[in-house]
């Protein structure tokens, strides 16, 4: 019986696992951590401690297999969505992140009558777990510039970008070993993986830091015997025919018994080509042509087949590079045994498992895309309202300048006062991002009388409360009239209260914050904006 140990990987920094052998321009990252990266990590730690025979067995023979690290949800590993699953174009198949089993189907089992002039669309580019939950790893973009080492400065015209898996996510993988591998050697491999490590590209920068932990092994479910053999590829597969790479998964290339027939009309195959970087040789290995993970292969087995022997052969990996996690399959998975998939009931799992918090990357790209999505959902209304409120704030600033006798082109510090700074508006933007899906919580953070961001305490409260010091320097306490509570914070809260229950309320705050962090606000505070001066007290 083969040995197997499961691990989790928690991303402490973004991790770059390049899809292609590109050396310039933008790098597109995989949405999983490849087995070759994990193998390289172990090799870097223990290769020099091993004998020649041990090193061959661990890293080259295929007797030990470092599988891909795949994303998780509720502590349950997700697998690449089977390419046999489809839904109808224009029809939803999701309820939050749960895939509706009644809305997805194996298109090879659908008759023309069932189609009813509807167009099937293949499910792609995400992962699913055994509970039918959709898992989409989060990526982020980072721009870099090359350094001119001769002049110790940024090189001209050498701007490039990195795509990376965002920090805060969790993945899971396992290491397998044939039963004839020495126990001491096996334990050395397992121990080398446990702890803090660095994976992927640009590890000397702000990328690649991860925490790897052993987790309890999960029992492998025994595949159900059937004359129709279904293989769901959990990783890419590289096949060889007469020492030549082939993309046709004929039975002989998979080690299946004589008489097995490939059911091409029931199979779903995609391919790709790539090269991986060999850090030891400081060069890319030769190009690989592979059948892509998520592909579904079906075969008809002969009548006299020993199904247990077929399973044993396939579980050791198929094709080339099995030591790097290629050629891993699920055999006769339950969800692919009928037209419509079946999921395990996850009600009990949700009680014991915790959803891994995924931190949305704070990159310019994500922020731009978020604004575009919001613009589609709410139109231009939030921006228009924010502009109107900003103009009104500008008018109150001009009233405050006259009230306090601030000279032209001077700031409020000349009279011992202060207007809200860029930092204050930055705080507004942070709150808008944090509570972008909850208007009521955002309003509470702005207006509550304990520590509300815009709530201004009166003189007595400021004197009696220790936290009152914070409000003296916020700028929101800036007065513009002799009447009580005529300050910027109170004014702004009054304006915003009209929209506090609207779903687009966070977008108003976000747009307002952007305006407040602009040069335009500085002009307003210095009295240099003619339009705001004219709008004072309107």
Image: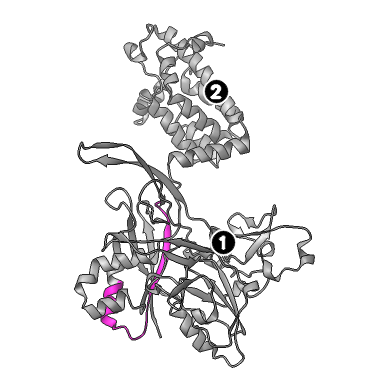
Extent of the magenta region: 166-190
Q: Position of residue 154 (x, y in %)?
A: 28, 37
Picture quadrant where residue 81 is located: bottom right
Q: For residue 409: magenta?
A: no
Q: Position of residue 222 (x, y in %)?
A: 52, 82
SS under mark 1: loop
Q: Nearer the viewer, residue 37 or 333?
A: 37
Q: Write the residue at 28% across / 71% down.
A: 191
Residue 503 appears anywhere in the view: no
Q: Write the residue at 52% across / 26% down.
A: 493
Measured in 3D between alpha carbons, the distance from the residue under mark 1 to the one under mark 2, in whole angstroms, is: 41 Å
* Label 2 CA crowd tier, 10 Å (few <14, some 14–19, many 20+): some
Name the outermost residue toward the bottom: 304
Q: Position of residue 165 (x, y in %)?
A: 42, 53
Residue at label 2?
387
**Circle nearer the N terminus (1, 2):** 1
Left or right for 57, reference 287: left
**Where, quadrant-wise, is the C terminus in this rendering?**
top right
Left or right for 444, reference 322: right
Q: Which mark is residue 133?
A: 1
Residue 7 appears anywhere in the view: yes
Q: Write the residue at 41% across / 86% down.
A: 1
């Amino acid at each position: 019986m083969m040995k197997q140990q499961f691990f989790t990987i928690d991303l402490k920094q973004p991790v770059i696992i390049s899809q292609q052998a590109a050396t310039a321009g933008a790098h597109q990252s995989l949405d999983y951590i490849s087995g070759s990266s994990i193998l390289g990590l172990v090799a870097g730690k223990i290769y020099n401690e091993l004998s020649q025979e041990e090193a061959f067995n661990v890293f080259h023979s295929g007797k030990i297999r470092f599988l891909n690290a795949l994303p998780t949800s509720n502590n349950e590993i997700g697998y690449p969505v089977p390419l046999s699953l489809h839904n109808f174009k224009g029809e939803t198949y999701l309820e939050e992140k749960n895939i509706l089993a009644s809305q997805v189907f194996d298109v090879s089992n659908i008759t023309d009558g069932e189609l009813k002039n509807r167009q099937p669309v293949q499910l792609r580019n995400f992962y699913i777990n055994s509970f039918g939950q959709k898992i989409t790893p989060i990526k982020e973009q980072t721009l870099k510039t090359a350094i001119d080492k001769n002049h110790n400065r940024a090189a001209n015209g050498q701007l490039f970008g990195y795509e990376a898996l965002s920090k805060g996510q969790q993945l899971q993988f396992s290491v397998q070993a044939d039963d004839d591998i020495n126990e001491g050697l096996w334990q050395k491999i397992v121990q080398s993986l446990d702890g803090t490590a660095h994976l992927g590209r640009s590890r000397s920068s702000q990328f690649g830091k991860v925490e790897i932990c052993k987790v309890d092994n999960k029992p492998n479910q025994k595949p159900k015997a059937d004359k129709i053999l279904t293989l769901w590829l959990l990783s890419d597969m590289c096949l060889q025919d007469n020492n030549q790479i082939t993309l046709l998964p004929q039975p002989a290339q998979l080690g299946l018994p004589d008489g097995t027939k490939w059911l091409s009309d029931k199979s779903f195959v995609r391919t790709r080509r790539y090269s991986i970087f060999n850090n030891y040789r400081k060069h890319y290995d030769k190009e690989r042509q592979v059948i892509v993970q998520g592909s579904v292969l079906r075969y008809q087995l002969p009548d006299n087949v020993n199904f247990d022997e077929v399973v044993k052969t396939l579980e050791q990996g198929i094709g080339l590079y099995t030591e790097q996690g290629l050629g891993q399959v699920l055999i006769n998975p339950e969800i692919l045994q009928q037209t419509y998939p079946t999921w395990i009931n996850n009600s009990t799992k949700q009680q014991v498992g915790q959803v891994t918090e995924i931190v949305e990357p704070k990159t310019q790209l994500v922020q731009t895309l978020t604004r575009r999505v919001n613009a589609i959902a709410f139109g231009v209304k939030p921006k228009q309202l924010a502009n109107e409120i900003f103009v009104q704030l500008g008018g109150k600033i001009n009233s405050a300048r006259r009230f306090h006798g601030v000279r032209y082109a001077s700031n409020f510090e000349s009279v011992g006062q202060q207007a809200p700074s860029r930092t204050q508006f930055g705080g507004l933007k942070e709150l808008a991002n944090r509570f972008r899906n909850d208007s009521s919580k955002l309003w509470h953070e702005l207006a509550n009388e304990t520590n509300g961001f815009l709530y201004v305490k009166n003189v007595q409260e400021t004197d009696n409360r220790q936290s009152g010091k914070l409000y003296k320097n916020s700028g929101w306490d800036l007065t513009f009239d002799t009447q009580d509570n005529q300050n910027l914070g109170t004014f702004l809260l009054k304006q915003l209260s009209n929209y506090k229950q609207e779903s687009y309320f966070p977008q108003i705050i976000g747009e307002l914050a952007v305006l407040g962090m602009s040069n335009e606000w500085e002009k307003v505070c210095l009295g240099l904006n003619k339009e705001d001066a004219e709008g004072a007290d309107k």
